[in-house]
Image: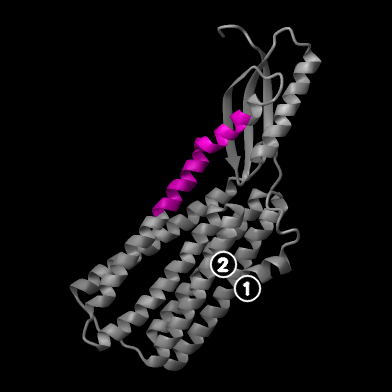
Amino acid sequence: MTQFLVLRFIKDHQNIKDPDVRLGYGLLEAWVSILVNIVLASLMFLAGTLLNSIALTANSFHTAADVVTSVAVLVGFRASRLPADDGHPYGHGRAENIATLVIAFLLLGVGYQFLTKSVARFIAPEPVGGSAIVIVGLLVASAIKEWMARFSIGLGRTVDSSALEADAWHHRSDAISMLIVGVGMLSSGAGFARVDAVLGGGVSLLIGYTGYRLMRGAMSKLLGEKPSDEVLQRIDKVTRQTDGVLDMHKVLVHEYGGKAHVTLHIQVDPEMPTMEAHEIAAKVKYRVAEEVDSDVIVHVEPHLMGG
């Protein structure tokens, strides 16, 4: 299904380095999530009303609320493609990190909500009512939400997007919560009322940790984290392999929503003509841009012995 949707709605889908193609992946995930959540919430509300099931009705509102996270992805990806301006000379690519941060906070809220309810229910167990029809409905809804999680993770990994990964975990938290409600109904009917609370507590900690991990990663990127050693090594290698480069230093890499901006200094023979030095800098710029998919600025300096 994922491959069908990608082929159907994303033109030139294999060219993931193209900003417009990357935007297409983000918009596809957001719109599919929004539409499926609306349909799923409507069906669950209808079923909950007809069956007089509080569990299904409550989950229908929870699912409808998930549209907010997908809207955050939609806005984040749209904003990230805004062109550079006087106030934002490097563009708006980090809007995607802000979307990740918003979803991370929502996940932390969901985890806290689950944890408090689980602790209260463990202290004062409550019977969980339900029926076979309700349980089947919850299992079907859980399966759909898990598919949405895998769909979002697949697209996120394709374009290396933390926002899509964050939205995926929001889908997965819903899938798990629906499954827990169903298990709680079964265990309560068998006389084990605290099983629901124990499972809920464990899942709440997992959701909270995921929210914290996503929040930490998004904040680190917003603050301008150091690039990986592997990226620095690749830049170092292609630069030093360029004829005429005698040394290099002051390599800076900033990422803006999947696009890197690299600044580096190269040293050349101080007796070299200016035009030749410029040509070497142009070669370095081209090779580094190809190697790490980035905009590159190369500063040229004379190579001084012992300097």
Q: Give x and y (percent) for residue 236.
A: 59, 28
Q: Main secondary structure of the magenta part?
A: helix
Confirm whether residue 86 shows in the render.
no
Q: Is residue 173 magenta?
A: no
State left or right for residue 251 relative to residue 62: right
> How much space separates mark 1 and mark 2, taking CA atoms?
9 Å
Q: Is residue 249 above or below residue 122?
A: above
State left or right for residue 190 relative to residue 90: left
Quadrant in the picture for the N terminus: bottom right
Q: Give x and y (percent) for residue 132.
A: 38, 92
Q: Is residue 24 above or below residue 280?
A: below
Task: Sort mark 1 into few (<14), some (14-19) or many (20+) by Cα contacts within 10 Å.
Answer: few
Label annotation for residue 1: 1
Label annotation for residue 14: none
> Mark 1: which amino acid?
Met
Q: Is residue 123 above or below residue 269?
A: below
Label annotation for residue 151: 2
Q: Choose the circle earlier in sequence order: 1 or 2.
A: 1
The magenta stretch spans which residues?
A: 212-237
Quadrant in the picture for the C terminus: top right
Q: Give x and y (percent) for residue 227.
A: 53, 37
- State the residue in front, 113 or 298: 298
**Residue at image coords 71%, 50%:** 18
Picture quadrant of residue 104: bottom left
> Mark 2: which amino acid?
Phe
